[in-house]
Image: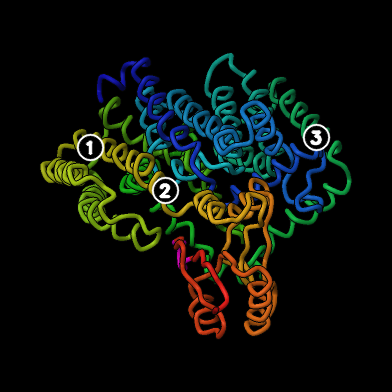
């Protein structure tokens, strides 16, 4: 690892290889999470109808997001076909771009060692790997905000590099066009806070700074004017302002409800430990090390990273609407904080990791946790996704157990470099297990695409509708995408009816057709269908979903 930290080509070989694995290996798997299906539906409708400026969904104007992200997906699908890989390519490229930008920020502020380890965190922590390849907006937004921050860092900390301000503001303009103005507000607030602490107004005297602002205003202003008054009225003035003051979606309520509800104001402080795993073991050391660098104005580089981490988590915590993926723009700051720890231990060699007693405790806890998780994880995955309990090869588990033991030994003998290197090795192992084992496993047994394919095999003709019973509150946006935009035909029997009325509608349908293949929850089958007189039913397939099981049932009349 020491040799790699001094070899730029070694950096790019390792990061490039791991980037291909982390963000591109699973591009073809089924869409299966966090609004992938919703955005794919908007893009498919956009390409099919040609409504590029004012997208629609199910015949209604879609004003909940600007069209820039859908333009990226549309360009990709028109080049490579309407498939999962093409839909995910913009996110995958942007995720790798975030890794590159994080590397250059670390290298600019501290050293190539800091940049390399920060980039490695981005390639291996849970949140980055899980969400980074998905066909969602957040990876693209994170890239634009990180690239914008890189522009400010290069312009401010490098001599005769002030033209980077223009690049920074263009990147933030792209972020504002992808989602909203917080893509601009947060990085700019971070930079201004640093200037206030340093009492430094020199950037405001630079023509490139003002050229960057002018470029931002022209790009963003022209973009939103082009989208029209209806979009501005709904998205900019209504939806965004409402999201700042209350919850939306299925958990509607005021900001006060959000701060003390299911996901309270401190929710991110707990979630971040999981999202940054296994690097979260180094969070206390990184925070304490940055906090010690005083007075702040004499340590602008360290202060900048500290502001990034603390400022972003404060800002995100104050927003009522909270989701794990919303934390993605903060992950590069955390990665740089951890990279700074490696820089001080490996390059500067002026910091003893064991100065902070919490470092030893956290690393011991990490090794113990990994020893337990590597054997407990298969049973948790089986319970949630119905993955086989032997999904992890035994020798892989033994190897991981050995690695956790090496980490424990390095900590107990106070070998800081060995311990830090071992955290990196274990992080790579966890990333590979997620990419090579867990995601393909979910795709094989519990994906919406699999459900559609299995149902299609039981249809009498290819054009028959995929049918569900009574309601489909179990289905996801991904199911809807495959039914409406791939199979292009779906139907609900007994929609919005009581159990009794829905059963009557089903019985009538079976009498008319002789037999019926239909999707329903296990609860519906046990409570409504199985006890019904005059019907005989057979379970053809079971599809596990988190917290429920979906059944494909064949129903006939009793002869």
Query: What residue is rendered at 48% in x and 26% in y?
Result: 100
Answer yes or no: is residue 199 visible. no
Q: Which mark is residue 422?
A: 1
Quarter of the rendering containing residue 496: bottom right
User: Which residue is identified by label 3?
Assistant: 223
Q: Position of residue 222 (x, y in %)?
A: 83, 33
Tell how many labels: 3
Query: What residue is rendered at 54% in x and 46% in y?
Result: 31
Question: Could you give the CA–CA distance between mark 3 and mark 1, rounded to whole angstroms?
Answer: 48 Å
Classify 10 as above or below 557: above
Query: Is 214 displayed left or right of 91 in the figure?
Result: right
> Over which residues does the magenta segment extend?
544-549
Prevalent SS, magenta region: strand
Query: What residue is rendered at 70% in x and 41% in y?
Result: 44
Residue reaching furthest right? 229
User: Which residue is identified by label 2?
Assistant: 444
Crowding at dot 3, Cα within 10 Å, few <14 / some 14-19 / many 20+, comes out as some
Question: Nearer the N terminus, badge 3 or badge 1?
Answer: 3
Query: What residue is rendered at 47% in x and 70% in y?
Result: 538
Q: Secondary structure at mark 3?
A: helix
Q: Nearer the viewer, residue 385 or 364?
A: 385
Q: Nearer the viewer, residue 164 or 243?
A: 243
Question: Nearer the N terminus, badge 3 or badge 2?
Answer: 3
Q: Secondary structure at mark 1?
A: helix
């Amino acid at each position: 690892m020491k040799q790699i930290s001094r070899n730029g080509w070694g950096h790019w070989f390792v990061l490039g290889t791991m980037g291909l694995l982390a963000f591109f290996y699973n591009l073809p798997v089924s869409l299966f999470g966090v609004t992938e299906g919703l955005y794919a539906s908007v893009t498919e409708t956009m390409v099919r109808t040609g409504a590029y400026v004012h997208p629609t969904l199910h015949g209604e104007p879609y004003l909940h997001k600007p069209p820039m992200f859908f333009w990226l997906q549309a360009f990709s699908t028109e080049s490579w076909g309407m498939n999962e890989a093409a839909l995910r390519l913009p996110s995958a490229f942007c995720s790798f771009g975030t890794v590159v930008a994080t590397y250059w920020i670390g290298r600019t502020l501290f050293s190539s060692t800091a940049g390399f380890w920060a980039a490695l965190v981005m390639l291996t922590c849970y949140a980055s790997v899980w969400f980074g390849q998905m066909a969602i907006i957040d990876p693209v937004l994170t890239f634009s905000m990180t690239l914008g921050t890189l522009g400010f860092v290069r312009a401010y900390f490098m001599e005769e590099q002030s033209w980077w301000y223009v690049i920074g503001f263009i990147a933030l303009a792209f972020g504002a066009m992808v989602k909203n103005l917080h893509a601009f507000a947060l990085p700019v607030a971070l930079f201004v806070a640093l200037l206030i602490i340093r009492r430094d107004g020199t950037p405001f005297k630079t023509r490139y700074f003002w050229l960057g602002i002018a470029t931002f205003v022209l790009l963003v202003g022209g973009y939103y004017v082009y989208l029209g008054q209806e979009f501005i009225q709904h998205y900019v003035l209504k939806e965004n302002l409402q999201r700042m003051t209350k919850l939306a979606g299925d958990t509607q309520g005021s900001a006060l409800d959000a701060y003390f509800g299911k996901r309270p104001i401190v929710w991110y402080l707990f979630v971040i430990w999981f999202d940054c795993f296994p690097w979260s073991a180094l969070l206390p050391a990184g925070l304490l090390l940055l906090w010690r660098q005083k007075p702040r104005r004499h340590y602008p580089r360290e202060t900048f990273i500290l502001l990034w981490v603390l400022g972003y988590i404060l800002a995100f915590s104050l927003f009522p609407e909270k989701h794990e993926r919303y934390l993605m723009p903060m992950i590069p700051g955390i990665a740089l904080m951890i990279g700074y720890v490696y820089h001080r231990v490996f390059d500067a060699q002026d910091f003893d990791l064991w100065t902070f007693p919490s470092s030893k405790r956290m690393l011991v806890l990490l090794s113990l946790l990994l020893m337990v998780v590597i054997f407990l994880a298969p049973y948790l995955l089986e319970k949630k996704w119905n993955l086989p309990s032997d999904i992890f090869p035994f020798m892989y588990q033994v190897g991981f157990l050995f690695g956790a033991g090496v980490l424990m030994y390095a900590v107990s003998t106070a070998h800081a470099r060995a311990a830090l290197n071992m955290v990196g090795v274990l992080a790579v192992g966890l990333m590979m297990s997620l990419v090579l084992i867990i995601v393909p496993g979910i795709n094989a047994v519990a994906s919406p695409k699999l459900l559609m394919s299995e149902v299609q095999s039981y249809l009498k003709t290819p054009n028959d509708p995929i049918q569900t019973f009574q309601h489909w509150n179990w289905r996801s946006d991904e199911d809807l995408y495959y039914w409406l935009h791939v199979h292009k035909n779906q139907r609900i029997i007994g929609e919005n009816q009581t159990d009794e009325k829905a059963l009557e509608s089903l019985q009538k349908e079976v009498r008319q057709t002789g037999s019926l293949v239909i999707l329903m929850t296990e609860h519906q089958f046990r409570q409504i269908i199985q006890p019904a007189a005059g019907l005989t039913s057979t379970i053809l397939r079971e599809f596990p979903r988190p917290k429920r099981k979906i059944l494909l049932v064949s129903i006939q009349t009793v002869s």
